[in-house]
């Protein structure tokens, strides 16, 4: 564990409190109160059923709040991920920067990056990957975004990690040449990332990588 | 025309099929867990399959604007294999998932004691999890199999309106209808039912409890059979409302008993080229899921 256990249940963000139906709100309040007791089989059931209790538009946020309230260990997160649906896996990935300080959960990020599910790829490339993913796997993840159409604007710390990365620049140039040789278009995002690799460009300001419950800041 | 295929094994089908199904009007499918055409040898093989039914396959379906749900179970055939039966202990963790809308396919294959045990245990799991049950009726010795199936259902905690009896035909439909269960018919190129026989059964027994599926899988089968039955129903004098009842509202009513049916296809941001399922899409073509 890399954190202290909470003493009270997590309050709902005001926007979510307003948008949920009364039964959904009651369910989520109950789920957060249970989660404040720590990770239990009940917590894992709440994570599984979030969409049918809260409505799919709110399920991601509900799952992330429950995970944060439960303060799971990396081993708990690994279990929830591997036993979870794609939606549960996405919630785990979004929660990593808030729940795991060290690189222990990297195998989950690497698992998600091996899939071809763009929802998982997107969730894997948040602040936790920015902080811990090796340069080699991070470069391949960027190329995979270009292949699969995942917008690179969602990649956390893109400018900071790409700045001055000559190897990434080479890989991007080779990919562009391969596309051009085939008479196929070069994705716009490729040029955007290539520009960021320029060591002569002004280096980006370091961005904070903590933040809100979605873990989507980038 | 909106179509719901309540029994199709999309894991075995191609993206061409998804594209053709969408064009034919299919907007929702349920994929029951079944066997793979060859034996599994461990519980882990089931778990990978269940993960696929809950992750990758809904993602593929969404690319084509089709809502995908699944049913989870140990199938009747592999209920006889001691290498597979331990998966029964793993089912509860899957039966709580959001897109699981029934326990199934369960039922009889060879009508063995091991199948009796697995069927009773899984009917109880359905009751415990607030789920209906999709019950496969055997292909061999079908009439006797139906009677043994109905006995198991009557002895279970499930009421008949929470049970869908599948793969029915002319010899089993009357007794199945009298039981009060939902009636499932699998329409195949050669076996099970065909479109003409299906329409005749609907005329004789009415559309009220009937669901029609393609049961398309890795064998010779046709994922557009739902549309072909709908077209023949109209040609033979059924109304559009009858078609909508059999091929949309009845499956929605049955699987809706789970409280987990979610028919809005999530907009996915995937516009893949290269190493993904939409590789080679014609230039400028948006995936069906983005319409």
Image (tube, coloured by chain):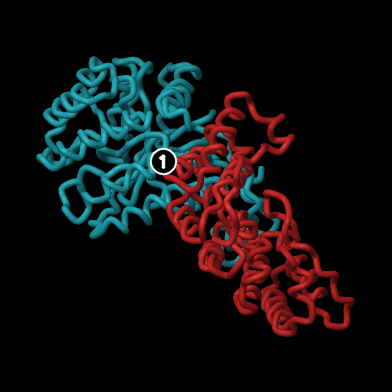
Chain colours: A red, B cyan
Q: For the N terminus of chain A, which image quadrant?
A: bottom right
Say above or below: B98 vs A73: above
Give me the residue at 20% from left, 19% from top: B175
Horizontally, residue B40 falls left or right of residue A161, namely left
Image quarter where the C terminus of chain A lies is bottom right
Residue B125's spot in the image, x, y percent?
30, 35
- Looking at the rendered structure, the number of numbered marks drawn on it comes to 1
Q: Does B205 sit above or below residue A53? A: above
Regarding residue B193, the answer to whether it shows in the image is no
Quadrant location of residue A59? top right
Which residue occupies 66% across, 42% down?
Answer: B291
Q: Nearer the viewer, residue B20 or A210?
A: A210
Q: Secondary structure at mark 1?
A: strand
Q: Residues within 10 Å of mark 1 (few under 14, many from 20)?
A: many
Residue B202, horizontal then vertical, whole percent: 34, 20
Residue A32: quadrant of the picture: top right
Give me the residue at 52% from left, 33% from top. A52
Find disc 1 in the rendering and name its residue. B70
């Amino acid at each position: 564990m890399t954190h202290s256990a909470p003493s009270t249940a997590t309050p709902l963000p005001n926007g979510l409190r307003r948008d949920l139906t009364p039964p959904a709100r009651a369910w989520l309040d109950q789920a957060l109160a249970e989660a404040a007791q720590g990770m239990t089989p009940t917590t894992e059931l709440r994570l599984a059923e979030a969409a049918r209790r809260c409505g799919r538009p709110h399920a991601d946020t509900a799952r992330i709040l429950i995970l944060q309230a439960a303060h799971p260990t990396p081993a708990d997160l690994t279990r929830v991920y591997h036993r979870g649906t794609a939606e549960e896996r996405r919630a785990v990935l979004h929660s990593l920067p808030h729940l795991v300080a060290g690189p222990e959960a990297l195998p989950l990020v690497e698992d998600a990056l091996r899939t071809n599910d763009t929802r998982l790829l997107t969730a894997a490339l948040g602040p936790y990957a920015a902080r811990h993913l090796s340069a080699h796997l991070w470069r391949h993840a960027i190329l995979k975004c270009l292949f699969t159409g995942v917008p690179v604007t969602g990649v956390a710390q893109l400018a900071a990690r790409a700045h001055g990365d000559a190897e990434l620049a080479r890989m991007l140039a080779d990919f562009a040449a391969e596309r051009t040789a085939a008479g196929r278009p070069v994705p716009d995002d490729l040029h955007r990332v290539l520009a960021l690799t320029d060591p002569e460009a002004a280096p980006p300001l370091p961005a904070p990588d903590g933040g809100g419950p979605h873990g989507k800041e980038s | 025309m909106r179509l719901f295929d309540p029994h199709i094994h999309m894991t075995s089908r191609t993206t061409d099929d998804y594209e053709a199904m969408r064009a034919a009007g299919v907007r929702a499918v349920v994929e029951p867990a079944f066997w793979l055409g060859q034996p599994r040898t461990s519980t882990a093989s089931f778990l990978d399959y269940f993960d696929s039914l809950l992750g990758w396959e809904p993602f593929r379906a969404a690319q084509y604007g089709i809502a995908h749900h699944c049913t989870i179970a140990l199938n009747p055939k592999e209920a006889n294999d001691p290498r597979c039966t331990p998966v029964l202990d793993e089912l509860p963790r899957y039966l709580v998932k959001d897109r699981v809308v029934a326990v199934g396919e369960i039922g009889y294959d060879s009508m063995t004691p091991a199948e009796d045990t697995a069927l009773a245990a899984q009917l109880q799991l359905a009751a415990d999890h607030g789920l209906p049950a999709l019950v496969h009726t055997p292909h061999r010795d079908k009439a006797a199999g139906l009677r043994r199936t109905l006995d198991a259902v009557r002895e279970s905690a499930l009421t008949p309106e929470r049970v869908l009896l599948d793969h029915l035909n002319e010899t089993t439909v009357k007794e199945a209808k009298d039981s009060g269960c939902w009636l499932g018919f699998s329409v195949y190129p050669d076996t099970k039912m065909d479109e003409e026989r299906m329409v005749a059964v609907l005329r004789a027994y009415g559309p009220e409890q009937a669901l029609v599926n393609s049961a398309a899988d890795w064998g010779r089968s046709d994922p557009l059979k739902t549309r072909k039955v709908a077209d023949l129903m109209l040609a033979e004098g059924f109304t559009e409302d009858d078609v909508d009842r059999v091929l949309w509202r009845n499956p929605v009513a049955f699987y809706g008993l789970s409280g987990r049916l979610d028919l809005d296809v999530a907009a996915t941001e995937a516009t893949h080229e290269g190493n993904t399922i939409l590789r080679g899409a014609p230039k400028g073509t948006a995936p069906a899921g983005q319409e």
